[in-house]
Amino acid sequence: MLSQIIAVTGVNIRSIRERAGSSAVAVIGIAGVVVVFVSVLSIAEGFRAAMTKAGDPERILVMRSGSDTEMTSGFSGEDARLIMDTAGILKGPNGPVASAELFVVVSHPKAATGTDANVPLRGVSPRVLDVRPEVRIVEGRMFESGRNEIIVGRAASRQFANLSVGSSVRWGENSWQVVGIFDANGSVAESELWCDARVLQPAYRRGNSYQSVYARLESVDSFQAVKDAMTADPRLRVTVLREQDYYAGQSRVLQTVIRTVGFIIAGLMGIGAIFGAVNTMYSAVASRTREIATLRALGFQSLPVVISVLVEAVILSLIGGLIGSLAAYLAFDGYQTATMNWQSFSQVAFAFAVTPALLIQGLTYAAIMGLFGGLLPAIRAARLPVVTALRQL
């Protein structure tokens, strides 16, 4: 049986070049589906990567109890002080390694279209670079405390207009001077603008209030002890999260939407590609009617014929999948864009990420389309009456 399968499959594969036209139709159709499938899912993957890169297991986020985002949180300056003084928070020479922060959304035009977008403006404390050691200034300098100065994430500087070093913008009741550009390893922080929280508070009439506190732990294992201490303190009503858990939750909604849309689009296109593969393989079976009849007359069984047709269909599909995956990688990997984070109602700049896992998914989807496309022609070839076929010899 195995030798029959190898022999018939070899004949089929060697004859593909004789049907180059019809084979190319199936290959191109499947390649198109894989391009769309991989490129759409790379949006979700890029967004997820931007959000999860912000997560540090030694960094926590503290918000008001019941809040699921910083936008809905809020507490007083005294509460922020109590949070930062909690045992288990890392202490440095200048006090707790923590940053009480204020998060607002400002309207600012996109660089490409000029249309207004919601850009996150974050007020931070002077210790912010100690809390987030991955952040580094790559152009200009850090803002000075007490001044109307901002630093801009690298991704935000590319996506939004007039945010280069030296430019001036106006939000709230203040004019702001851009004095630096910072890099955060491609995380969501690069979509933000940072300024001194003490300056941002009066600009938006927030008084002595904050929305969150980011703090570094003494160790990864101290998270539960810190959480228990804060939640047990009767003076505080807070929610304590690992930063990586918070951002993973922030990305979940948009990832689900994009992946759902991507699978629906790819599924609809895949149906068309399957019909193309069916037509191609029916044509292949029809052109080899005499070959199949001869093999059957010589004693070859039906199963090797079925498997040979399916193998040919899968090979053509995998060729299409490879072409589509390569095209998606070259065209979209690293492509910079921005989209709305529906949980914070602000823009998040990120890069499409065509990962090895997505490429494998694309090839797997191509193989599945090939199997479905070759199934009916394979059954027809196996059921072909030997006597009827031999009359064509």
Image (tube, helix red, strand yellow):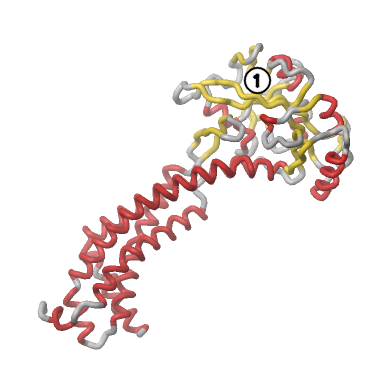
Res 89 seen here: no
Give the labeled residue for mark 1.
179
Foreground pick, 185 / 96: 96
Is 302 rendered above or below residue 158?
Answer: below
Is 294 rendered above or below residue 211?
Answer: below
Amino acid on which the number 1 mark rests in the picture:
Val
Q: Secondary structure at mark 1?
A: strand
Residue shown at the point (71%, 26%) measured from the top left: 102
Whole-percent x, y for residue 82 in the image = 86, 31
Is 243 on the left-hand or right-hand side of 372? right
Whole-percent x, y for residue 85 in the image = 88, 34
Whole-percent x, y for residue 119 in the image = 58, 26
Is 26 rendered above or below residue 350?
Answer: below
Task: Give the class, few, some or many, for how many residues have Cα within 10 Å of label 1's Cα (few <14, many ≥20).
Answer: many
Q: Quadrant of the C terminus?
A: bottom left
Residue shown at the point (69%, 32%) measured from the top left: 70
Q: Quadrant of the N terminus?
A: bottom left
Residue shown at the point (33%, 75%) measured from the top left: 307
* Quarter of the figure with residue 96: top right
Going by the picture, which residue comes out furthest to the bottom? 299
Whole-percent x, y for residue 280 in the image = 24, 62
Res 157 seen here: yes
Q: What count of labels does the image hold?
A: 1
Is 247 rendered above or below residue 180?
Answer: below
Is 322 on the left-hand or right-hand side of 24? right
* Quarter of the figure with residue 212: top right
